[in-house]
Amino acid sequence: MAEGTIVTDGDAASKVQVPAVGAPVEEKQAEGEPEKKENGDGQVTVPEQSAECTFVHPEGGWGWLVMLAAMWCNGSVFGIQNAFGILFLSLLREFGSENDEDLRFRTAWVGSLSMGMIFFCSPIVSVFTDILGCRMTAVGGAAVGLVGLLASSFVTSLGPMYFTYGIVFSCGCSFAYQPSLVILGHYFKKRLGLVNGIVTAGSSVFTITLPFMLSGLLDRVGLQNTMRVLCIFMFVLMLAGFTYKPLLPRKPRSARGGCPPLSQIFNVNIWKSVGYRIWAFGIPAALYGYFVPYVHLMKHVEERFGKDSNKEILLMCIGITSGFGRLIFGRVADYIHGVNKVYLQVTSFFVIGLMSMMIPLCHIFGGLIAVCLLMGMFDGCFICIMAPIAFELVGAEDVSQAIGFLLGLMSVPMTVGPPIAGFLRDRLGNYDLAFYLAGIPPLIGGAMLCLIPWVEARSKRAKEEALKDVHQKMLEHEKPQEEAQCKAGESIL
């Protein structure tokens, strides 16, 4: 069975299988024998077959443990990042005063830098994943994150925190996070949507529960010891990375002088897909307004409903429904054929854009809760099907860098959008216009994504027509050879 040869050693299998397919053809050509004599039309498709064509995904088994490990990765990385607001207040007390506006601004940049670096490093992480594999990249990243977080627990001033927490810890998280998305495609195909939904739901679970744990730890053991407790999460994440056993073979890489060509290090094949290019620029275009409600909603609620309003329940609503959305839409995606999964993301962006515009219109707190419930549900939909769409657009062999470059492009709007909204608030005195404008980019980005199924269908038809032309020319070339063989046989008789 093809799966067995690949499962035992993915890298070795790729090096053995690829020559095995092409070798008979080379021997026949060397001996002067026509390729078509023995295989007929088959010789055209056989050399083009990749290991992925003969690979059968286990759809379970060890893959369930890999899924749990990836879920822990998603939860611990983004759970800690999303809980920075709890650490933020402790950092202010540790290094100064909560009422110092300058210190608040400088401290906020620690969390912003950390979240931005996770996505900014993604293209580099994808290259390491292709070269070193998912297991080594994830384990090494978790180890670096552990060192960065542990070093942050010994810092006594804000300056070094930019490096230890904002760069070292976040870069380690980035190297640990991305392989957790790629490795799932080695074990699942039919259930990939459901599995991605479960894995990404881990961040929702951790985001809801971790703040309560951190608040208790900060009151009892202080900031430094709380960070050391969080190091346990990173240590478990490092152990989880060892479960990432690769099944799909890597693409063979030719090396000259011991170094692979630059074109093989940076995968340019993904950019040849028009559908991927639209996707890679459409999603960042939508994200310029996507994160504005998540950053500024609490302040808007204080200004409209008062500081005593129960604004924390809004974040809880978003977190809970986001978790359910990831599970529900992850399963729904498994029943949608091919790149048509993109329509789920289109729906997500349309709903999120409209809900952003609805926020200033909600003068009743209950209406704001309803808006947040819908926003969280479709936020989960958008996130959980990113990896399945990447697999559909570029295939399993190229998916690592496809996801990496997308996340890298996402880092720009994630950083730019919220400050623009804050600038508008300072100029106009309220957030109304900021939320109205925040709803426009998701609508534009969603409209761009609608082009992907049409483009991919047209590309598929073009390939099928080209393949038919090749077969037709081969058949026409075979007829003179067969006639020549028949005439040669008649003359001998």
Image (cartoon, rainbow, N blue to C red):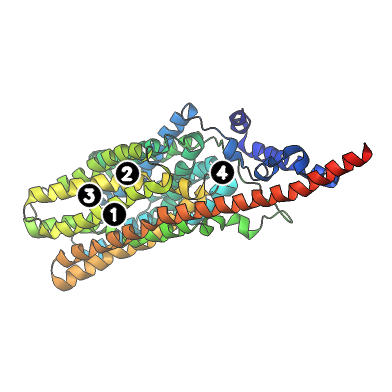
Q: Which residue is mark 2?
A: 79
Pointer 4 with pointer 2, Cβ within 8 A: no
Mark 4: which amino acid?
Gly
Question: Which label's residue is closer to the chain start, 2 or 3?
Answer: 2
The numbered disc on residue 375 is 3
Give how far across and how far down residue 238 sits, in percent.
47, 38
Q: Which residue is farthest bottom?
A: 427
Question: Which label's residue is closer to the chain start, 1 or 3?
Answer: 1
Q: Looking at the image, how many numbered discs can be counted on the residues? A: 4
Give how far across and how far down residue 207 sits, in percent.
28, 43
Query: Going by the image, does 386 lie left or right of 214?
Result: right
Q: Nearer the viewer, mark 4 or mark 1?
A: 1
- What is the quadrant of residue 306 in the picture? bottom left
Pointer 4 with pointer 1, Cβ within 8 A: no
In the image, what residue occupies the spot 85% across and 46% down?
32
Q: CA distance from mark 4 to mark 1?
A: 33 Å
Q: Which residue is mark 4?
A: 133
Mark 2: which amino acid?
Gly
In the rendered view, tell whether residue 105 sits above or below residue 218: below
Question: Which label's residue is closer to the chain start, 2 or 1?
Answer: 2
Q: Nearer the viewer, residue 432 or 335?
A: 335
Mark 3 secondary-structure assignment: helix
Is residue 241 visible in the rendered structure shown here? yes
Q: CA distance from mark 2 to mark 1?
A: 23 Å
Around disc 4, counting alpha carbons within 10 Å, would you say few (fewer than 14), some (14 to 19), or many (20 or more)?
Answer: many
Q: Which residue is mark 1?
A: 349
Question: Which label's residue is closer to the chain start, 4 or 2?
Answer: 2
In the image, what residue occupies the spot 78% across and 40% down?
37
Q: CA distance from mark 3 to mark 4?
A: 36 Å
Q: Quadrant of the N terminus?
A: top right
